[in-house]
Amino acid sequence: MSGKKQGENISVEFKEYHTPSSGIFFKARKQLYKQDSPHQRIEVIENEHFGRVLLLDGLVQTTDKDEFFYHEMLVHPAFLTHPEPKNVLIIGGGDGGALKEVLRYPVENVCLVEIDAQVIKVSQEYFPWLSPCLRDERTELIIADGTEFIGQTDRTFDVVCVDSSEPVGPSASLHEEDFYQNMKRCLDSRSVVVAQSGSPIFHQSPIKLKNRFLKEMFKVICFYTSPVPTYPGGSWAFVFRSDSVRPLEINGNPPEGLKYFNPDIHRAAFSLPNFLKNELD
């Protein structure tokens, strides 16, 4: 793997601004990796509290300490409600966290479509959950643009997880109306699609826009939220959509060993705070 590996101790602050005057910072104990791929800048640092931190174009994607909040809440609401998920598509998610959660279930095939092969390679080296997931015989890795894949495939999926980063750079198209319109061809009446939708505090305008066009495509649209300590505002929004499956009609039990998600958390997550509920209503 090409890239600049720096294992020495350093004292550098990494800052991600969420507004012009506020954000989150990390003191890096070590700079483990830093390199530009054809798509984005990839960095891995080591922080005393959060452990290893993956940043893409300077934005936090995942950390050792708190990845389970995001990945469990992206994946398990769909699997707790779909009656029999067998074929799964993950768009993005090159760090492997969503794949790790999906493989807890007796699925038949998980197609992981990631645009940046370098993110896969870096995550294999620095985040220990990815390599065994890629070796799982149910995993199918495709290095491709998720938008192009959706536009060309003739396959049908029971569950689709859109594990994109913020709507900038290579992930921008994964937040647009055309992407979801093309996705409808890949779904049947029982399919469930879940996607991260940004910060309910800082990203209300794009959440409202997504709510508006998704309501025209799907019969069931429900937003839900979860804490994610290292994401903007410490809280994150997701959107659940289907043409028949409803998020509070639970059809099974979550796997053992989860750190955050359980059926009570599932139900509570769909109870939105007034400021967000009023915007969506």
Image: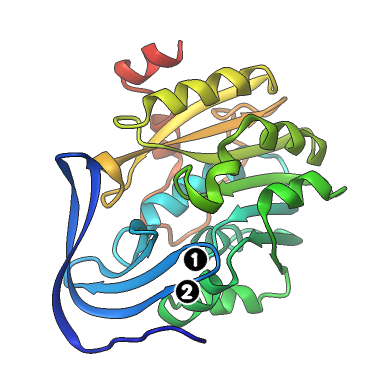
> What colouring method underlies this structural image?
rainbow
In the picture, the disc for residue 207 is none
Q: Is 7 above or below relative to 128?
A: below
Please, what secondary structure does the residue beneath circle 1 have? loop
Q: Quadrant of residue 243?
A: top right
Residue 171 in percent (x, y) is at: 54, 49
Task: Tell which of 221 and 271 is nearer to you.
Answer: 221
- Local crowd at mark 2 within 10 Å, few (<14), some, or many (≥20)? some
| Contact between labelled residues 2 and 1, with CB atoms less than 8 Å apart | yes
Task: Tell which of 156 and 20 is nearer to you.
Answer: 20
In the picture, the disc for residue 123 is 2
Residue sitting at x 67%, y 39%: 82
User: Image check: 87 left or right of 102?
Assistant: right
Residue 259 in percent (x, y) is at: 37, 57
Please, what secondary structure does the residue beneath circle 2 have? helix
Residue ranking furthest to the right: 154
Amino acid found under the numbered disc labelled 1: Asp
Residue ranking furthest to the left: 11
Amino acid found under the numbered disc labelled 2: Ser
In the picture, the disc for residue 95 is 1
Question: Which badge, 1 or 2, is on the more N-terminal residue?
Answer: 1
- Local crowd at mark 1 within 10 Å, few (<14), some, or many (≥20)? many
Residue sitting at x 37%, y 31%: 203
Residue sitting at x 76%, y 36%: 182
Residue 247 in percent (x, y) is at: 56, 30
Q: Quadrant of residue 192?
A: top right
